[in-house]
Amino acid sequence: MSNSFHLPESFLWGASTAAHQIEGMNVNSDFWAHEHNELLAGRFKDKSGDACDSYHRWPEDMDLLAGFGFTDYRFSIEWARIEPAPGEFSNAEIAHYRAMVEGAIERGLRPMLTLNHFTLPRWFDEQGGWLSDDAVEIFGRFIEAAAPIFASGVERICTINEPNMVARFATLRKMLTGAGNEVVASDHGYDGSATQALIKAHKKAVDVLKRIAPHIQTGWSVAIQNQHVVEGGEVVAAEIAERARDVFVRASAGDDWTGVQSYARVFIGPEGELPVPEGAQKTLTGWEYYPPALGEALRTVWALVPGTPIIVTENGIAESDDARRIAYTSGALDGLRTALADGIDVRGYYHWSALDNYEWGSYIPTFGLIAVDRETFVRTPKPSAAWLGAAGSDRSLQLATESAS
Ligand code: BGC
């Protein structure tokens, strides 16, 4: 096979971001509260602060992405800004996100909106978040109120980002508050009620969207852990796969698309997850450098929901050496083109991330195609941005040779 990746017709080609990680001053969100909670001091190396100031600088970010050649942009709307108090909606914030949608379209970037990328309004978190009795209704009400943002021009919506990670956090929170004694070791940290609450919230979101904006293709994006099972770990691996991944992927059967987010792999032994093997190459997050993760993730998901179109909504690497980012991404895309050649229905690829951003507690792991000065917010594109983005206009990409197969 040559080392070119030819994009199938109408293949989506973009970069991804999330509001809390780039906007700055997201003061009404639960994560901001956690960053400033003295009881949690020490868990956060950095506070998000101004982040990339993209709340104000989004036109520049979009200019850059469109300039590289990307045709798509996935970003999230911030619930904590739109609904700062229960049932109280900000028309100004709705207008802000509507302007972003229109700004993207004007620049030739098709927007994919994420309705919830981890962060919650502080008041919703305080009442129990996804585990509160009326969580599903509250989420539905938020989507109805936000409807002007996606009234036209938005073809795709991701309801909830990585519900499997969210369920894990919700379970941990329940355990920390002493209400989760029923979570036992064999649950592997996943309380079924959090899982079910998130699945219900997703179904509700899809129902609301099909009613108020039937033209929009809906789905959700699951973090896909590729398991490499060490002898004796088979039973535990199957239990973890079911609770931490598969139940969430299967919940997307029948959606317009299902989102795959893939970065690395995990080793599982008889006692559960094992550390990254000694001597393995690592990235700035401490994860293993493992480009084949994406191809493996696509096969896992296709086997779970055969026939449901897949969109890669996140894939990338925390790395300071940009040549290594190009090598990693080439390896990942090599897996994607092989999956396509084998008949797996992949409709698009969004790289994580557009910018070096706030990595949930630290600014050290740099996933961005564009560097951001932490004091001046000046953007400096890395070579990977032009390399990857150009495929959007050229419809073809030269992969770094080490990954050519
Ligand atoms: C999340 C992003 C995060 C990225 C890298 C995904 O889990 O959706 O918010 O920054 O992975 O850790």
Image: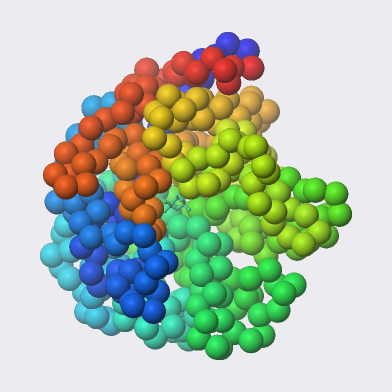
The residue at the point 41 percent across, 63 percent down is 118
Residue extending furthest toward the top: 2
The quadrant of the image that shows the N terminus is: top right
Tell me if I can see residue 207 in this picture.
no
The residue at the point 23 percent across, 75 percent down is 84
115 left or right, relative to 26: right
Front in this rendered view, residue 23 or 308? 23
Front in this rendered view, residue 225 or 397? 225
The residue at the point 73 percent across, 45 percent down is 228
Question: Which color mode does the image show?
Answer: rainbow
55 left or right, relative to 8: left
Task: Please identify the quarter of the rendering in which residue 190 is found.
Answer: bottom right
Q: Residue 288: x and y, percent?
A: 59, 41
The quadrant of the image that shows the C terminus is: top right
The residue at the point 80 percent across, 48 percent down is 230
Tell me if I can see residue 314 in this picture.
yes
Front in this rendered view, residue 47 or 344? 47
- Image: 134 above or below 63: below
Task: Please identify the quarter of the rendering in which residue 325 is found.
Answer: top left
Residue extending furthest toward the right: 232
